[in-house]
Image (cartoon, helix red, strand yellow):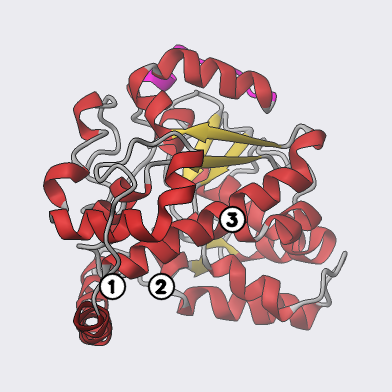
Amino acid sequence: MLGSMLSAHPNYQATPESQFKNYLFNWFDYPDTLQPDECRRILDFLPTNFRFRLWNLVADKEALLEACRTRSIGGLLVELARQYAWQVARNAHATVWIDHSPDNISLTRELLHYLPEARFIHIVRDGRAIAASVLPLDWGPNTIKGAADLWTQRLAQGFTAEQALKASGRFTTLRYEDLVCDPEMTLRKLCAEINLEFHPNMLTGNGLQTTVYNSRQHALVGKAPEKDRINAWEEQLQPRQIEIFEWMTEPMLRNLDYPLKFNGKARAPKRTEWLQMEVEHYLGKVKNVIRRKKRIKRALLTAPKTSISEQRVVQVGALSAGA
């Protein structure tokens, strides 16, 4: 939701999630420049990665090679975002790239190396609402224990990054509930903290083009924030799921001022419940692999057959490196 709201600014552009960059970070040890064969390796890889293909981009190969050779991985990523803004989003005025990939919070070191102007936003949300959102999906946890573990892990990553980067002015933490209840004040404060320009269009929240792949989980993207969804988890989760989640995460929920449904008296899972969750985890994992493969296959039916072109296909835009 936040990525779509920020991207409603005429000069800001959100792209689809960019997990393909994680492979590049793992392949190379923070190079300032890349050799031609290394650049070709990257460009051979990108069309094989479904995350990149979901961008629905037919990228200009020569422009990518030039960016890769002269500005390493950071230059390549910015060039991809520039081409997406111009070719897919039809936004020739974009100067800021908004990347809402969920695992960016664990990649702050790599992102700051390659994109030194990068800024980070850590969104904190009630973990029970997170659980209600992710459990039906075909990725991530499929038990309430897994959802609790994921929430605490992501919070730890976010607060660790905040400790390291807060003084630099490149990191801020935002509460999801504040954004929903008072979007204008929250967005104005957010933009001031990380030196972005607020624009009234942000309040419409319609700046992100969703893909076929994520249309279900992003069903609310492009719609105005709905306050009644803040506590929708109370109906979506079973009472025992809520109780187990609170038993596992009570200190964190309390420290973040989220009220407890069980008032600190949540009961620990029984031995049979632990066993049941383990079985559900493994069965759900197999089921989700099948579901996800089908979803990827459906999504790629609408993707371009060729995602990198030998022809010059883009106009050089103004998106700045590190934005």
Q: Residue at left 78%, top 47%? A: 164
Q: Nearer the viewer, residue 63 or 89?
A: 89
Q: Nearer the viewer, residue 196 or 96?
A: 196
Name the residue carrying label 1.
296
User: Distance of mark 2 from mark 1, alpha carbons?
Assistant: 7 Å
Between disc 3 and disc 2, the foreground one is 3
Which residue type carries mark 2? Phe
Name the residue carrying label 2.
50
Q: Residues within 10 Å of mark 2 (few under 14, many from 20)?
A: some
Reading the chain from its start, which is encountered first: label 3 or label 2? 2
Q: Residues within 10 Å of mark 1 (few under 14, many from 20)?
A: some
Percent of width and height locating residue 69: 81, 66
Between disc 1 and disc 3, the foreground one is 3
Q: Residue at left 51%, top 37%? A: 13
The quarter of the picture where the C terminus appears is top right
Q: Residue at left 73%, top 61%? A: 110
